[in-house]
Image (spheres, rainbow, N blue to C red):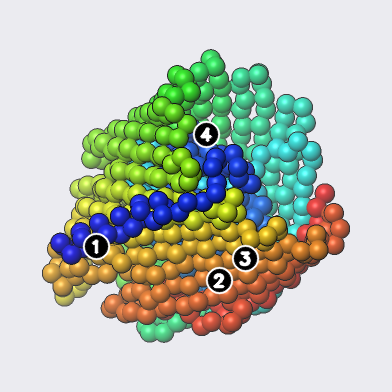
Amino acid sequence: MQHRSLSSVRVVLAVLIVPVLFRPSVSTAADTNRMPEVVVTSTRIPSETDNTPTDVTVIQGADLERQQIRTVSDALREVPGLNVVQSGQPGGNISVFMRGANSNHTLVLIDGVRVNDGFSSTFDFSNLPTDNIERIEVLRGPQSTLYGSEAIGGVINIITKRGAVQPTGSVTFEGGSYDSIRSRFSFADTIGKLSLAGGGSYFSTDNDRVNSALRQRDINASIGYQFLEHFDAAVSGWFRSSHAGSAGLDSGWGANDPSAVLNDENANVAVNLHAQPFEFWDARLILSHNHDRKFFYDPNGNAGGNAWTTTDRDQIDFQNVFTISEQHKLVAGFSFDNAHANRAGFYWFGSPTLIAPTTTSYSGYANYEFTPFARLTLNAGVRLDDFNRFGAETTYRVGARYTVPGTETILRANFGTGLRAPSLNDMFFPGSGNPDLQPERSLGWDVGFEQPLLDNKLRVGANYFQTEFNNLIQYAVTNSFTWAGTMMNVQQAQTIGVETFATWTPVKDLLVRGSYTWLPTAEGDVIDPSWQQRRLLRRPRHSGDLSASYRFLKRFDLVLRGQFSGDHQDYNPGVVKGFSYTKLDVGLSCDVCKHFTVFGRIENFTDEHYVEVAGYPALGRTLWAGGTVKF
């Protein structure tokens, strides 16, 4: 490991020294043409992105609309340090690997409510459109101190739109290749003290494989009321459903199943109470309930049987922000999480299986932010989680941000621990569950910089990160003849990498963005010697994104977007290598008038033949065209 440590030191020194070599003409932060973005996820305290110790990536909903990005998963492909993997075509499971962590190591929030599956603790992005999204905030690295289990690798917070000052709304219809149709509507308004917002969408496509058709529906709404000057309340909710053919692998036993289907329904309701009892005290209480139902039906028996799973998850989060002074701020809160699942499996061979497990946790957290002067921010936090299955666990995190005078270079450093509790699926799945599992843990740190140049028309940055994972849960074979086994805490892993990013506005109305992630180390060790130091699956060493958007003649928007992913390893069965690809999307829209826009795009413009998951080919060239009416 000595050569790896020396290499890590060299990379860290490069990340820290490079910005010092720049001597831009920017003298103060005020001399820029970039409006600061305010985020809430980093420390739970509203802060400008330039002032947070954690490097936060913010994706604005308006940009998604302009770039004709219709799914959250496609939006996340622009984020450095993230690898988004889809099992084939629309409707296939979509996972996010953040800085090389497992796909179940990313916590997903919608308006601050955790929405990871209560049974598996994963989140499938395949059913999540970009409808009614205000912005997306992405935090990379262990974030369990403020957000608990599942934030072992990072957090994605999706913030939806609320009532508008003036009545607004839109209706969109578009059609495309493979008999694809997408329709959407949205609205927002404020009537006195009452605010309203909502929307819905329908998406259908036949894709280009047998039994791969998809039908998706989404409806969402929020209503808020300002009862008093310092007290307001809001109720929000959504319902999503999908019906997807499940063709399976494209070759081998059971491939191209002509009849298996997966139905998925998810509903959520949340009550958000916000008050400011005193000028220094801001309190927020969020109560939420989530219901998820999945049904897999395989009439031909190729997949072995049928199964349905329902999960109900109740959560409480009580957050308090105390502004002691401009230099001293404290966040303190309490969380409650209860998940209950019912699962029934009916198989062609063997007896039916029925389980109905429950898990509960209570948590307390605190984070102190100290800003001795405007150019320096320090924070430190700690959290205690008490789980009914395996007792109490503690996580912590410290971070610092310093803006260098003269160059306005932003330097950041963070160090912290993460935690993921075993899911109900890990502990109780028939035949392999293990109720004696212990939590997975991580310890990670990162250092980085962000540099404004050319009067802030150009911003570049990089982060070096390193994370150690322990107690990772994995299926361990206990009978080599039947391949029977159980889930066990048997794996360790390490990820080391560098993520870089740049934003450039060379001329007015032209925006160029790019990101590149180098992940030289993503290795795991398990108790089986033949698996030692194996490259973690679906983690390419090289990946990146480059996009350009240009508005011309005051009514046209041209968008070019390229993505590339280097070779990685997968399982099909046995370890296989390859899967590198480059994909280009092109879009053009025209504002015919103030209230009507027409648009078109070509996804996978070069008709690249590629797979992100072994055995699940992606779509070829896809054409779309449509229009939006705004009112």
Distance from disc 2 to disc 1, alpha carbons, whole Å, reads 30 Å
Residue 7 shows which numbered tag? 1
Disc nearer the start of the sequence (3/1): 1
Disc nearer the start of the sequence (3/2): 3
Callout 2 secondary element: strand
* Closest to the observer, 206 or 549: 549
* Closest to the observer, 215 or 517: 517
Q: Amino acid at mark 1?
A: Ser
Identify the residue position indicated by label 4 in the image.
46
Query: In the picture provided, is 349 more to the left or to the right than 78?
Result: left
Identify the residue position indicated by label 2 in the image.
562
Disc nearer the start of the sequence (2/4): 4
Query: In the picture provided, is 500 more to the left or to the right than 584?
Result: left
Distance from disc 4 to disc 1, alpha carbons, whole Å, reads 37 Å
Q: Residue at 33%, 60% (x, y): give it.
A: 497
Q: Could you say where residue 174 lies in the image, as x and y percent from the top left? A: 73, 67
Q: Could you say where residue 431 lies in the image, as x and y percent from the top left? A: 25, 60
Mark 2 Cα shell of 10 Å, populated few (<14), some (14-19), many (≥20): some
Disc nearer the start of the sequence (3/4): 4
Identify the residue position indicated by label 3 in the image.
548
